[in-house]
Amino acid sequence: MTPDSGDDAPYQNVEYLLEHGPAPAEALPTEVRARQRAVGVYSFTIQGGSGSDGLSLQGQLQTVYYLDDHSPETVISTFLETNLGLVDKATVKGLVRRFGGHGSEWRDAARTVLSEEYDLLAEPATSMSSGEPRDVKCWRCGTRISDLETHLSEDCSG
Ligand SMILES: [Zn+2]
């Protein structure tokens, strides 16, 4: 029995995703069709929106395809890599809210990716907590202080 050429196309995509992780349509070996869902291939995107929360990207976002096995973190990470510029254009709050529209695990994953890969959310005070404030030199009197703003308004003698 020889299936016609279209029949194993979805499986080629599944194999690609298994091997490489989440990917945009252009990276997949075959065209994505509606049947992909039947073999476990899911699509991910976020709505462009009105721009009121910093996201105004209708029609510009590329969908990322993934398998049920893939964690929300890897999907979101790939989505942000695929849609370069999204992180710059949108607010962190806006992004977290849009990703969170897919469910709480997606919201948590978005926060993780934005903080660990893009350094965009305040890090919890753990390993870096012992860092001392850096002294700066006052441009008016030359004294080294840690808080220039307070120094200038309260005790600068220059
Ligand atoms: Zn001073």
Image: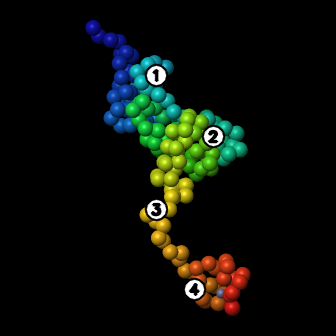
* Tag shown at residue 126: 3
Query: Residue at horizontal 53%, vertical 48%?
Result: 111
Residue position marked by numbered label 1 in the rendering: 37
The relative height of residue 81 versus residue 12 in the rendered view (above or below) is below
The relative height of residue 121 versus residue 138 in the rendered view (above or below) is above
Q: Secondary structure at mark 1?
A: helix
Residue position marked by numbered label 4 in the rendering: 144
- Which mark's residue is nearer the viewer, 2 or 1? 1
Q: What amino acid does circle 1 point to?
A: Arg
**Distance between the Cα atoms at labels 4 and 3?**
28 Å
Q: Earlier in the sequence, mark 4 or mark 2?
A: 2
Q: What amino acid does circle 4 point to?
A: Arg
Query: Residue at horizontal 50%, vertical 62%?
Result: 125
**Distance between the Cα atoms at labels 1 and 3?**
42 Å
- Which mark's residue is nearer the viewer, 4 or 2? 4
Q: Residue 60, can we see it?
A: no
> Residue 36: horizontal and vertical position, in percent?
44, 22
- Which mark's residue is nearer the viewer, 4 or 3? 3
Q: What amino acid does circle 3 point to?
A: Thr
CB-based contact (under 8 Å), mark 2 and mark 3: no
Q: Secondary structure at mark 2?
A: loop
Query: Whereabouts is ligand 1, in terms of quadrant?
Result: bottom right
Q: What amino acid does circle 2 point to?
A: Leu
> Residue 151: horizontal and vertical position, in percent?
66, 82
Q: Earlier in the sequence, mark 1 or mark 4?
A: 1
The relative height of residue 131 versus residue 57 in the rendered view (above or below) is below
- Which mark's residue is nearer the viewer, 2 or 3? 3
Q: Is mark 1 within 8 Å of ligand 1?
A: no
> Residue 121: horizontal and vertical position, in percent?
55, 55
**Distance between the Cα atoms at labels 2 and 3?**
36 Å
